Image (cartoon, rainbow, N blue to C red):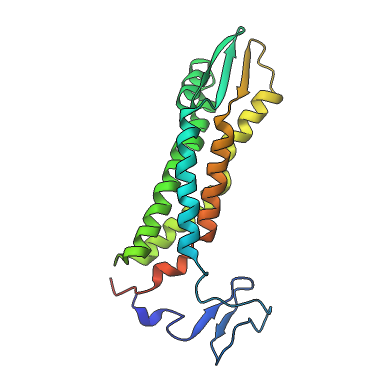
Amino acid sequence: MSSKGNALVQGFIRCDDCACLVKIVDQLSTCPRCDSHLHARHPHSLQRTTAFLFGSIFLYIPANIFPIMIFSQFGSGEPNTIAGGIIELIDGGMLPIGLVVLVASILVPSCKLIGISLLLLRVHFRWQSNARRWTVLYRIIAFVGRWSMLDIFMLSILANLVDFGSIQIIAGPAATAFAAVVILTMFAAKNFDPRLLWDNQQNL
């Protein structure tokens, strides 16, 4: 797709609130349909996304170093990190739960951090690659973000509602750091303006 297909180049701005495509006339700054303020691109999108991303990376370290759960069986148990908790769940005969924690606690956050980093690098260095594929990547990151708290919810249910008899699960201090990572990555994806991916796009 060539840059002449860019709506902004042709003098149009899309309203973020009502999705109305507005023709830029003189100093038009509000949407004629919903009266919302129009932005050609979200102000400070890259700066905000970068800040949230760095915060996520910073908190992802203690989220993996400190115990996220205490898995106790027959009155004995030790604090476990995310990886250790997954092993304990599998050894305790809860393979499906262990796999859910593996996907939600390790694979999904890691992929989101890498994906958002690549999006920022693509815009910053203006890589001339297929913008459509990068947009799909952004949509995937935004979609999976809503499922990122799945393992935190599951640990809360296990700790408070489910009675395993000889098995007891208690959330550890890393759960707070991990929840913060999830929230910050969601904010990072929310603040990223995917329209930036189409700026300076050339025929590919």
Residue 137 percent location from the top left of the image: 42, 56
Question: Which image quarter: residue 23?
Answer: bottom right
Front residue of 77/158: it is: 77
Which residue is at the far right?
A: 161
Residue 55 percent location from the top left of the image: 49, 47
Question: Which image quarter: residue 200?
Answer: bottom left
- 49 to 177, vertically: above or below: below
The answer to whether residue 148 shows anywhere in this view is no
Residue 167 percent location from the top left of the image: 62, 14
Front residue of 161/24: it is: 24
| Location of the C terminus (image quadrant) | bottom left
Q: How many marks?
A: 0
Q: Is residue 115 left or right of residue 63?
A: left
Q: Is residue 76 left or right of residue 204?
A: right
Q: Is residue 188 left or right of residue 166?
A: left
Q: Residue at x 45, y 36 (%)?
A: 61
Residue 101 percent location from the top left of the image: 52, 31
- 96 to 153, vertically: above or below: above
Q: Is residue 12 left or right of residue 159?
A: left
Q: Residue at x 51, y 77 (%)?
A: 40
| Location of the N terminus (image quadrant) | bottom left
Q: Residue at x 50, y 66 (%)?
A: 44
The answer to whether residue 123 shows anywhere in this view is yes
Which residue is at the far bottom?
A: 26
Q: Residue at x 53, y 60 (%)?
A: 191
- 28 to 116, vertically: above or below: below
